[in-house]
Image (tube, grey):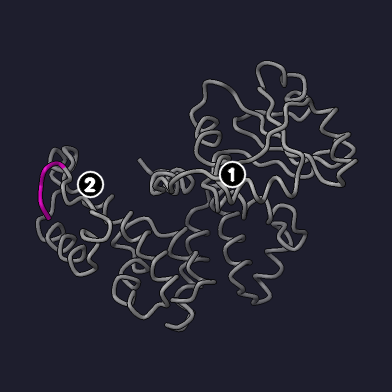
């Protein structure tokens, strides 16, 4: 079954260590949040959640506690959480909340400026909020800019993600792959274009992954480290798949592909740096 982009992004995300800051959700209701936003000259961010739904818990436990998320949201918004089935039920009806989690960004008069539904990894969520508040990144404006020939990393990322969120995956990936193929080697390995690989590559057979495996040592140190982290996730996922019962049961195991995967892991020294699946199901690589 085909997973959505957001589910894949989450499935490839690893724990990042001890939390040193987190999003400050204030223990106030919506009306008090409006008053505080007026006093602080900010917007109101509302997390409409339920107790029982997994994506709501994932955002609460894995995303909002992260430092980068807290730094961004605490500076930009008065943040509150409302249980859409309890104390926030009336407000959920007011904002026509139909799915969870749903995030509303409201102005100081209580009008919804932005509505975002679903769970996101930290960096993608911050980018999504920034894009939604940027008039140059509305769907209509992005279409105009893209069709005029503009190809900045910010536009390509936002425009592709807009298609992905609408489940128009073919259109979204075409934007990404056309952009990647138009870049020079230097541009492909740059920090500003790393998103093409880190956000839109989910399989080691993807040409973008194979390009990075081949050229990883040409990237500068910081970009190389970030790219290797993503490569590690992809190879861990691939090796797990090769050794899964499902692969054997469906007669999809390919010994040559498996051996090539192990060869790549060794050549990249992922087993030494990340202990990538070295002891996965008790099999040495």
Distance between mark 2 and mark 1 Cα atoms: 35 Å
Which structural element holds mark 2? helix
Is residue 240 in the magenta section? no
49 to 106, vertically: above or below: above
Query: Is residue 282 highlighted in magenta?
Result: yes
Quadrant housing the C terminus: bottom left
| Residue at image coords 77%, 59% | 135
Q: Magenta part of the protein: which range?
A: 281-285
Looking at the image, residue 66 sits to the left or right of residue 37; the answer is left
Question: Percent x, y for residue 120?
Answer: 54, 44
What label does residue 241 carry, if any?
A: 2
Name the residue nearer the viewer: 272 or 217. 272
Residue closest to the eye, 188 or 24: 24
Residue assigned mark 1 = 21
Q: Residues within 10 Å of mark 2 (few under 14, many from 20)?
A: some
Q: Earlier in the sequence, mark 2 or mark 1?
A: 1
């Amino acid at each position: 079954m085909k997973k959505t982009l957001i589910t894949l992004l989450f499935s490839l995300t690893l724990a990042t260590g001890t939390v040193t800051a987190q999003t400050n959700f204030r223990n106030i209701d919506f009306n008090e949040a409006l008053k505080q936003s007026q006093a602080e000259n900010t917007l109101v961010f509302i997390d409409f959640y339920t107790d029982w739904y997994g994506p709501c818990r994932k955002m609460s436990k894995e995303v909002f506690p992260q430092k980068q998320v807290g730094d961004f949201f605490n500076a930009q918004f008065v943040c509150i959480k409302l249980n859409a089935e309890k104390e926030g039920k009336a407000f959920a009806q007011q904002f026509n909340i139909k799915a969870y989690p749903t995030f509303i960004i409201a102005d100081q008069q209580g009008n919804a400026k932005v509505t975002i539904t679903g769970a996101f990894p930290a960096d993608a969520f911050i980018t999504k909020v920034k894009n939604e508040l940027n008039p140059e990144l509305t769907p209509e404006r992005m279409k105009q800019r893209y069709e005029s020939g503009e190809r900045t990393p910010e536009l390509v990322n936002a425009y592709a993600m807009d298609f992905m969120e609408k489940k128009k995956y073919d259109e979204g990936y075409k934007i990404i792959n056309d952009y990647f193929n138009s870049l020079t080697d230097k541009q492909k390995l740059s920090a500003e274009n790393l998103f093409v690989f880190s956000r839109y590559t989910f399989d080691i057979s993807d040409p973008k992954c194979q390009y990075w495996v081949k050229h990883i040592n040409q990237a500068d140190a910081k970009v190389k480290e970030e790219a290797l982290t993503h490569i590690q996730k992809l190879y861990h996922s691939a090796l797990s798949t090769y050794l899964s019962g499902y692969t054997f049961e469906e007669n999809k195991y390919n010994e040559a592909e498996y051996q090539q995967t192990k060869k790549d892991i060794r050549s990249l020294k992922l087993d030494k740096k990340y202990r990538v699946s070295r002891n996965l199901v008790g099999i040495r690589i």
